[in-house]
Amino acid sequence: MSSTVNLTAAFNDFLFASVGEDRNDMPLSVVSTLARLNLDPWAEAAELALMSADGATRRLSLLLAEVSDGPSNEPDRETVAARLVSLLPAMAKTGAPAAWPAIGDTSAPPLRSVWIMSLLMLASMAISLIIETRAADRGVSRQASRPATSTSTPPDKVPR
């Protein structure tokens, strides 16, 4: 990919937009269509967003035509492609969407909250494991310290 765009949720409107239905009447989104072509949907969306609207429409129209079980009731792929391209985020002159930082941009907010949540979840899982392990050890040791007594009578001593 020639762009250094940070691939985030800004492509969601485009990627999860409806393309139509396939020949089995299953709904198709842009992401599922691109995946059927063995293309990385986010990378393809980033490339399309860097193109002119006409270029992106032509490219997407060609991709839609390549899907063997693609939209059965969409005679005008150019119209569908143009509608979908209009959902791509507007790109600034830098090649990055206006609301996104480029990769390596130090003004981007840190992923601190993700790390904090991950550490909290890890600590919670560790505490749960410790509590369960200690509870299981107590159960085993209590059972082991009890004298072995049998409450059943051997079959040859059963009164008749």
Image (cartoon, rainbow, N blue to C red):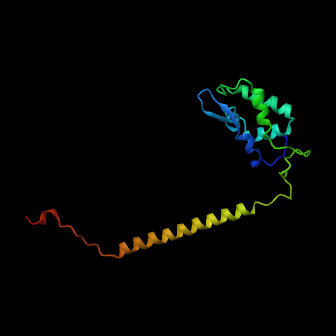
Residue 157 place in picture, x, y as percent: 12, 66
- Count of numbered circles in the view: 0
**What residue do we see at 74% from left, 43% from top?**
13
Q: Which image quadrant: the N terminus?
A: top right
Left or right position of 47 against 74: right
Left or right position of 139 against 68: left
Of the pair 130 and 64, the residue shown nearer to us: 64
Of the pair 112 and 160, the residue shown nearer to us: 112
Query: Residue reaching furthest right?
Result: 93
Residue 43 place in picture, x, y as percent: 77, 40
Q: Vertically, is 111 above or below 43?
A: below
Q: Quadrant of residue 128?
A: bottom right
Q: Vertically, is 142 above or below 125?
A: below
**What residue do we see at 91% from left, 46% from top?**
94
**What residue do we see at 58% from left, 28% from top?**
24
Left or right position of 104 against 63: right
Residue 82 place in picture, x, y as percent: 79, 32
Q: Quadrant of residue 111?
A: bottom right
Q: Quadrant of residue 159?
A: bottom left
Residue 131 place in picture, x, y as percent: 51, 71
Q: Vertically, is 10 above or below 149?
A: above
Query: Residue reaching furthest left?
Result: 160
Of the pair 98 and 122, the residue shown nearer to us: 98
Q: Which image quadrant: the C terminus?
A: bottom left
**What residue do we see at 71% from left, 35% from top?**
34
Q: Vertically, is 66 above or below 41?
A: above
